[in-house]
Every structure is written in C-alpha cells, then in structure tokens.
Image (cartoon, coloured by chain):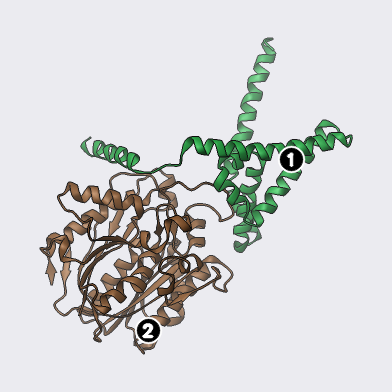
Chain colours: A green, B brown
Amino acid sequence: MDKKKQQQAYENYVKQKTPVHNLPANMAKAFVVGGIICTIGQAILNYCEKMGLSKDISGSWTSMLLVLLSVVLTGFGIYPQIAKWGGAGALVPITGFANSVAAPAIEYKKEGQVMGIGCKIFTIAGPVILYGIFTSWVLGLGYWILKISGIV
Amino acid sequence: MVKGIQSIAFEQSPYLISSASVVGKKEGEGPLGKMFDMVEEEDLFGENTWEEAESAMQKEACLLAIGKAHLAPEDIRYLFGGDLLRQGVATSLGVEELGIPMFGLFGACSTSGEALALASMSVAAGYGEYMLAVTSSHFGSAEKEFRFPLGYANQRPLSAQWTVTGSGAFLVGKKRSHVRITGVTVGKIVDYGLKDSQNMGACMAPAACDTIIRNLKDFDRVPEDYNRIITGDLGYVGQSILFDLMRGKEYDIKKNHMDCGMTIFDQQLQDTHAGGSGCGCAATTLSAYILPKLERGEWQRVLFVPTGALMSTVSYNEGASVPGIAHGIVLEHC
C-alpha cells in the first residue's frame, strides 16, 4: 500500500510540474479551424444543390471532395501543420478521418501492399470504424425495441 | 577496481580515442549544428526506408570514428551497439558490413552509456586493444514505432520530446588520447509508477537521480567534483524534476547540470517542446560538444549519465508503467 501511495504522490507531483497547452486558446483555435473546414463543406453542399443535385447526392459530393482535399494535403505534409495549430478542429471533421487513413497508407507502403498498407492502413482509424459501427448497432437495437413496444 | 555498490574505478583507465557524430537536417540547424562531423540534408540518407537510413548513419559514424584513429574495422576487437527499434535492427543491419564481432544492446536512450561502459570494461579487463561503442536513433523510425506515422495530424503535448536523428560512435582503447574513462556506475531500473509515455523526462528522472547519487557515494565525491553532470535526455520537464528529487536527498546539482536534450535543439526556434531524445541525442552531443571540451581541458572531469525509458508499445498498451535506467560514465581530461 505504501508503494502505491508513493506512486500516486509522484504522479500528482509530475502533473503539477508538467506544462500543458492553454485550454481556452486551443479551444478557440479548434473552433476556427473546424469552422473553416465545415464552412468549406457547406459551400460545396450549397453549390451542388444550386446545380440541381438532390440533397443525398450533394452530401456525397461534399464528403468525397473534403476527403480528397484532406488526402492531398496529407500527402504534401500540410495537413499535420493545420492540426498542430487547430487540434481537434482538424481531427473531428471527416477530413481528420481521411488523414488518419492516408497517413498510414503513405508510411507503410514501404512494408508492401499486403503486409504494409493492407494490414496497417486502419491502424489509427480502426477504433473509429469498429466502435462507430458498434454504436450504430446499439442505437438501432434501442430504436427497434422502442418501436415494438409502441413508444416510438 | 570494484568501487562501492554499483561502480567500477579503472586501475588502468581506457582512453576514449576518437568519436564521430552523424546527424540529420533538424539537428544540423540546431545550436550544435556546426560541431557535428556529418549533417545529412535528406532524412532518408539516400535509402528507401527510415530504418535503412538509421543503419546507414550507424555505419557512417563507425567508419568515421575508426578512420579518425587511422585504423580499419579489422583492428576493432568487439563492437557494442544498440538502438530503439524492435529487435535492434538498425544496429544489426548497420554494422553487419563492418564484420566486427558484436554485442547487440538495449538500454533505450541510455544505450550510449551502456555501450561505453561495456566497451571500457572490456578494454580495462584486457579483452582487446580497441572496442567500438555505437548507438543511433531516427525521428522517422521512432515515431513510426512508438507513436504515429509521420503524416498523421495530431497535437503533441508540451512534455513530448523530439527524437534526434543521429548516430554517435566511440572508439575506446589503450592508445593514448586526451580523454580517459576513469569510472563507470552501472544503473539499476528505477520505477516511480508513471504511465505517461509522452512525458519521458518525468519517467526517467528518478533513475538519473538514483545513478548520480550512487556514483557520488561510490566514488566519495560531491557534485562540485565534476565540471558538469550531464544527463542524456531528461528535457526541460525532467531536469526540473531531477533538481527536486536531488534536493530531496540533499544534493544540489543546479549549478553544474547539463542535459543533452536541452542542448541539441533550440526550444523556441525549432518547436521541440520538452527537448531532444533518443539514443542519438546523448551520443551525438557527447561526441560533438562534450568530448572536444574535455580534449581541450576546458572541462577536467564530467559525469555523463544518459537515461533510458524502458517501455515497449505493447507494455504501454497493456497498462504497464514506464521504468527508467541511467548509466554513469566518468570522463576525465588527461
């Protein structure tokens, strides 16, 4: 028990000695970057609808173009610099997901198409895919239960 | 020869005959830029992968160090080398062409100390005339192994350190030179239970404290007996913690402490957060910055204490803590 207390004490001490990023500043920067990315997305959506495309198709074009933009910027090493400043503002939108797939694809190309890219391309995005789908299933299950019990 | 609890004081101190440092672009742009033997602008070093680049650096550093002493690889009895990568591949594939019988080591960022300790112990024990100690690290290969692919967009915490792309090689032997390795304090693993792999300075500081104090006690010395007590890569956060830990044990090393991780990069201009890290950090700084001062006699005696964080990606994911180790090498001008 004594050792655990010591370790906890050291952890607390290190926490107060370690500098951290300024939270309000980071939140503000994330807001700006995330906002800009979403505004670009909205602009694409508006343009597609203006051209007469349905809402669904417009949405698909928006996602595709944002993903393309992110992959290209990742390839040129620009996207990491955006995230360095914008943090979660660059990670949360679909562009962040695209970056998390493109980056391993580039890095692991050296290990081959199968064992490299094939096995490791989802090394960062894997949890997002797995738990995103799992959560959808859970919510779907909940919705179904509510339906059959007449609540919804 | 055996001194105190963990140390060795050599009766016939081996000489640190020559050394070489090979680094990448960022290091060349740092405060020590002009002091390195070789600065490579392309971080791939003309190879196809980061791992091959790191191997190329090691080979180059070895050849330079051997060449400076006008020797050939055949003259080296044993090579002691290691790196950060899985199964130490950078070292194996780097030194294989040299054809020197070798010991592959792992001490994380303390490998330069481990290699120098073993090399000097071998010479002092009479097992050979010339021994080579080498280590390296590479930003690309280390980030890929321990953190994320380089293209991944994430924010590094302020306590994170920047792995140095560099290799340092040291020739230890009986031939006279101006620097002697007069003593060694072999470190033991010290674990204060910290699990934050992005704050390595805090993980390693207890080990540095332990080895430094052990060295002082074994050799019956005080901090002022050394012109400098030099840690490998505690960084800004780790240094501050080290001072507190030492003060807690009633030792004050604030006046003559130096850290390679804080010296090799300019924190403001190069955005390296808590400082440099990696096996190459301590090794290249020792070769390019510390040894010349000892050779000139500007410093008479220093304690070189590189520290290592003994973790793997698996141990970290499985919730293990990150223990530290530090090896002390006593270097003297002669």
Which amino acid, mark 2?
Ile
Q: Hey, which residue is sitting farthest right in the picture? A: A52
Which amino acid, mark 1?
Ser
Q: Residue at x 81, y 32 (%)?
A: A56
**Label 1 CA crowd tier, 10 Å (few <14, some 14–19, many 20+):** some
Picture layout, residue A55 above or below residue B265: above
Residue closest to the eye, B60 or B272: B272
Q: Quadrant of residue B134?
A: bottom left
Q: Which residue is mark 2?
A: B66
Residue closest to the eye, A141 or A25: A25
Q: Which residue is mark 1?
A: A63
Q: Residue at x 52, y 70 (%)?
A: B53
Element at label 2: helix
Asked whether, in this view, residue B53 is left or right of residue B64, the answer is: right
Q: Position of residue B34 (x, y in %)?
A: 43, 73
Asked whether, in this view, residue B156 is left or right of residue B174, the answer is: right
Q: Confirm whether residue B323 shows in the render.
A: no
Element at label 1: helix
Q: Quadrant of residue B45?
A: bottom right
Are discs 1 and 2 less than 8 Å apart at CB?
no
Q: Residue at x 51, y 68 (%)?
A: B25
Q: Position of residue A37 (x, y in %)?
A: 67, 40
